[in-house]
Image (cartoon, coloured by chain):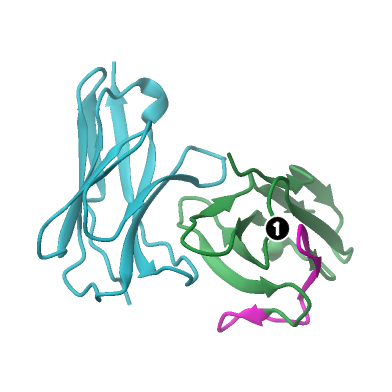
Amino acid sequence: GAVVSQHPSWVICKSGTSVKIECRSLDFQATTMFWYRQFPKQSLMLMATSNEGSKATYEQGVEKDKFLINHASLTLSTLTVTSAHPEDSSFYICSAKREGNQPQHFGDGTRLSIL
Amino acid sequence: DAKTTQPTSMDCAEGRAANLPCNHSTISGNEYVYWYRQIHSQGPQYIIHGLKNNETNEMASLIITEDRKSSTLILPHATLRDTAVYYCIVRPRDDKIIFGKGTRLHILP
C-alpha cells in the first residue's frame, strides 16, 4: 500500500532556531502534498497545500514567511518553521495523494517542541 | 463550515460490531464520503471511501443511505486497537481534506 514517511519523528530545539521537516511519498509520485498542524486535544488543522514545481497555497491565517514549504520533486515536500518560538510547538503532519480517485495518505507526524 | 455531524464519543464492547454514524445532509453530487481514523499520537489512517454505493474492504464497511445524506462506518469485530478518533469527511474527489472533530471511539474489554 501507499506509504508516506516523515522525518524527524520528534525534535526539540531552542527558541529562535529554524526547523525543517521532510515528507516523502515512498512508493508513488505525489504532485500534491498537504501540511497539517495539531494541538493537544484538537483536530488537525490544514496549513497549506504543496504543489510540485509551484508555490504552496496557504490557508487563511497561516504565515507563509513563517512556514516555508518547498515541493521540489514528486516525492518530497519540506516544511521549514523559521525562527521557531514556544507557541510553534505542535504536532505537524503531512499527507500525499496520488492522481485520480485515490485517498490521501498521511505520515506519522513530527512532534516539535520549542524551548 | 462543518459539512458533517458526528457524535462526540461512542463506546463499543470488544468483539462486537462498531457502528459509527455520520450526517452529511448538504452533500453535493460530486462529493465523496471518506473515513479516516487517528490513533493517539499517530497520523490519520485511511479507512474507506465511497460515492453512493456501499463499500467494503479488509478494514471496514461503509453504508451510504440512498439519499446520500448520511452514512455509517462499520467495524465488524472491534478490538482494543480500534480505539481512536474517527473522522467522516465529505469532499470532491481531488479536494483537500478538512477535518472536523470526529468521534472518539472507546473499545471496552
B62 left or right of A57 in image? left
Image x and y of residue A95, in percent: 61, 57
Q: Colour of chain A?
A: green
In the rendered structure, the residue with mark 1 lies on which chain? Answer: A
Examine the image and state in which quarter residue A19 appears.
bottom right
Image x and y of residue A48, in percent: 62, 73
Q: Which chain is cyan?
A: B
Residue at x 56%, y 57% (from the top left corner): A38
Q: Is residue B86 magenta?
A: no
Residue at x 79%, y 45% (from the top left corner): A8
A47 left or right of B10 in image? right
Q: Is residue A77 magenta?
A: yes
Q: Quadrant of the N terminus of chain A?
A: top right
- Magenta stretch: give its range: A57-78
Image x and y of residue A110, in percent: 70, 48
Name the amino acid type tagged 1: Gln
Residue with the most extreme left position:
B66
**Is A82 rendered above or below residue A86?**
below
Image x and y of residue B52, in percent: 22, 59
Q: Secondary structure at mark 1?
A: loop
The answer to which of B3 and A84 lies nearer the viewer is B3
**Is B7 rendered above or below residue A56?**
above
Examine the image and state in which quarter residue B55 appears.
top left
The answer to which of B98 and A32 lies nearer the viewer is A32
Q: Which residue is mark 1?
A: A29
Residue at x 31%, y 74% (from the top left corner): B30
Residue at x 25%, y 76% (from the top left corner): B28
